[in-house]
C-alpha cells in the first residue's frame, strides 16, 4: 500500500487499534472523524453494558453448515473454528455473545448489495452465533469462506475472513473484528488488515491451524482467541 | 498480573445486516407494555463528511431504566430494577441514513458518591469505513441538569450541542408522541463529539 495516509484520530491503544482515517481503505475518507476523540471519566454508564443481559436471551445457532434449514448442507471445506474469549488479564469471559457472518465457499455473501458473479449456495446463510461457556470457550462449525473481489482499488481482493461481533462484561468490551486464515498471500495486499498498526496486532487476527481441533473424516480445525477489555476499570472518583 | 494484548478492531463491512439485523437480533423497540417510564421515540440520521446519509450503518444504545438503574450486575445502586426493561437497542440505518428506537427516558445515574449525571443514553456506531466503532452519548436538550453534568464538562463548549437531542412532539393516530431527534455526523461541520472509549 503506497498511498497510505494514516490519520491522527486514534482510539485507545495505538499499538492495537487502527486509525479512523486510512486512505488506502477508501471508505474511511468521508466517514472518519477528524476531531480528536474526547477523553472522558469512566462512570457506571461505561462500566456496565448489554453483554450479560443479551447473552441471557439470545438463542444459540453455531452450525452454519446446516442452519439454513433446508435439510441440505453447505458446500465447501467443512471447518471448526474454536477458541476462547479472554479479558486483558487473561481471565476467561464466560457467557459472552458472539455473532459471526461470512461469505460462502465461492466468496459470495447472501446480501442484496453483493452482486459479483460468485455462485450463491442455497444451503448457506453465512451467519451464526453462540455463547462462550464457563471457560470462555466458543465453537462454530462452518465452511471455509472464499476470498472475494471489491472495488476499493484495481484488482482488489479481500482475503478469506469471518466477521466476529463480541459482547463482554461492559460497554468497554464491545468489539467487532475479523478473523483471517493462516498463510494467505492476500494478507499483505489488504488495506483493511493493514490498517492495524503493528505486525503483532495483525498476527493476532489470524487463526492457527490446530490438528487437535481437526476431527477425523469430518472437519479441519482452527483456533482463535479474542481478547476484550475486562471489568477492572474503576469509576472516576473526585 | 499478566496483561494480554487486546484483539484489534476491524470494520463491520457492508454485509452485516442479515446477521446483526435479523428479526431476532435487531432491537428497535426496547419497551414492553408494562415498562415503567415516559415513552420516547429516538430518531435521527447518520451522515458522512459530505452530509450524505450513511445507509449501511448500525447504531446500538445502552441506557438505564426510568429509575436510573442499569440492568447489569455491576450496578449496585438501590434504585429498583425494571424486569421488563433491558436497556439495549440496535437499529440499522435505511436508505436515507435514518435509525430509530422506541424506549423510555432514562433516570439520572450516579457519577460518584456526591454527584449525579444528567439523563443520557450511550450510543455506539458501526459502519463500512469505520475501522473502529464510535462511541458517544445522547443527552436531552430540555433537561435542566445538563448544565451540571460532570461528563459534559469534558466536552469543549462549542461541541456540546452535538450531543443534545432536540425534542419534537408529533401526533400519530391522535396520540401525542415525544420524539427526540439525534443526528450523528461522522465528519466535518457539526461533527459529533465522540469519546475515546
Image (cartoon, coloured by chain):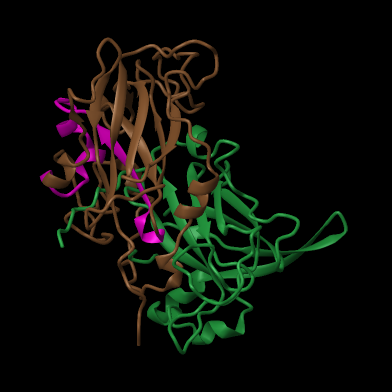
Q: Is residue A52 above or below residue A218?
A: below
Q: Position of residue A93 (x, y in %)?
A: 33, 50
Q: Colour of chain A?
A: brown
Q: Is residue B185 above or below residue A28?
A: below
Taking depth in this image into account, of A217 and B99 the one nearest to the observer is: A217
In reply to whether residue A191 is colored magenta, the answer given is yes
| Image side of residue A80 versus residue B169, left or right | left
Taking depth in this image into account, of A178 and A93 the one nearest to the observer is: A93
Displayed quadrant of residue B23: top right
Q: Colour of chain B?
A: green
Q: Is residue A7 above or below residue A219?
A: below
View extreme (front): residue: A134
View extreme (bottom): residue: B114
Count all numbered tags in the image, as a single digit. Answer: 0
Q: Is residue A141 above or below residue B129?
A: above
View extreme (right): residue: B174
| Image side of residue B23 versus residue A6, left or right | right
- Region in magenta: A170-199
Residue drawn at x 29%, y 32% is: A82
Residue drawn at x 47%, y 64% is: B73
Quadrant including the N terminus of chain A: top left
Quadrant including the C terminus of chain A: bottom left
Q: Position of residue A162 (x, y in %)?
A: 33, 31
Q: Position of residue A55 (x, y in %)?
A: 48, 47
Amino acid at each position: 500500500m503506497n498511498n497510505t495516509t494514516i490519520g491522527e484520530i486514534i482510539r485507545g491503544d495505538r499499538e492495537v487499534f487502527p486509525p479512523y482515517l486510512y486512505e488506502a481503505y477508501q471508505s474511511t475518507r468521508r466517514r472518519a472523524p477528524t476531531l480528536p476523540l474526547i477523553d472522558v471519566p469512566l462512570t457506571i454508564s461505561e462500566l456496565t453494558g448489554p453483554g450479560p443481559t443479551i447473552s441471557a436471551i439470545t438463542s444459540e445457532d453455531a452450525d452454519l453448515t446446516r442452519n439454513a434449514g433446508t435439510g441440505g448442507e453447505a458446500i465447501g471445506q467443512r471447518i471448526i473454528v474454536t477458541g476462547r474469549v479472554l479479558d486483558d488479564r487473561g481471565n476467561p469471559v464466560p457467557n459472552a455473545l458472539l455473532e459471526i457472518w461470512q461469505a460462502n465457499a465461492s466468496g459470495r455473501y447472501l446480501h442484496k448489495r453483493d452482486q459479483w458473479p460468485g455462485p450463491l449456495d442455497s444451503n448457506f446463510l453465512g451467519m451464526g452465533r453462540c455463547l462462550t461457556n464457563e471457560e470462555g470457550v466458543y465453537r462454530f462449525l462452518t465452511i471455509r469462506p472464499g476470498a472475494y473481489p471489491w472495488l476499493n482499488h484495481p484488482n482488489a481482493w479481500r482475503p478469506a475472513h469471518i466477521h466476529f461481533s463480541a459482547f463482554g462484561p461492559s460497554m468497554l468490551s464491545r468489539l467487532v473484528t475479523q478473523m483471517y486464515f493462516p498463510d494467505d498471500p492476500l494478507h499483505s495486499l489488504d488495506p483493511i488488515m493493514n490498517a492495524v498498526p503493528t505486525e503483532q496486532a495483525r498476527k493476532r487476527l489470524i487463526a492457527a491451524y490446530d490438528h487437535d481441533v481437526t476431527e477425523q473424516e469430518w472437519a479441519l480445525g482452527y483456533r482463535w482467541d479474542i481478547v476484550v477489555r475486562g471489568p477492572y476499570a474503576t469509576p472516576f472518583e473526585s | 498480573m499478566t496483561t494480554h494484548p487486546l484483539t484489534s478492531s476491524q470494520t463491520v463491512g457492508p454485509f452485516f445486516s442479515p446477521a446483526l439485523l435479523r428479526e431476532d437480533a435487531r432491537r428497535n423497540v426496547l419497551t414492553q407494555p408494562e415498562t415503567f417510564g415516559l415513552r420516547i421515540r429516538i430518531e435521527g440520521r447518520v451522515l458522512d463528511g459530505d452530509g450524505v446519509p450513511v445507509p449501511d450503518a448500525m447504531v446500538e444504545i445502552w441506557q438505564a431504566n426510568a429509575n436510573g438503574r442499569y440492568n447489569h450486575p455491576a450496578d449496585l445502586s438501590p434504585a429498583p430494577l425494571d424486569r421488563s426493561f433491558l436497556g439495549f437497542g440496535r437499529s440499522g440505518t435505511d436508505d436515507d441514513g435514518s435509525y430509530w428506537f422506541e424506549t423510555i427516558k432514562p433516570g439520572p445515574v450516579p457519577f460518584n458518591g456526591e454527584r449525579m449525571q444528567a439523563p443520557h443514553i450511550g450510543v455506539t456506531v458501526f459502519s463500512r469505513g469505520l475501522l473502529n466503532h464510535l462511541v458517544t452519548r445522547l443527552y436531552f436538550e430540555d433537561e435542566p441538569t445538563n448544565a451540571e453534568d460532570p461528563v459534559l464538562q469534558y466536552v469543549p463548549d462549542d461541541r456540546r450541542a452535538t450531543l443534545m437531542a432536540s425534542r419534537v412532539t408529533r401526533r400519530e393516530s391522535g396520540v401525542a408522541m415525544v420524539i427526540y431527534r439525534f443526528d450523528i455526523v461522522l465528519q466535518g461541520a457539526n461533527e459529533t463529539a465522540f469519546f475515546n472509549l
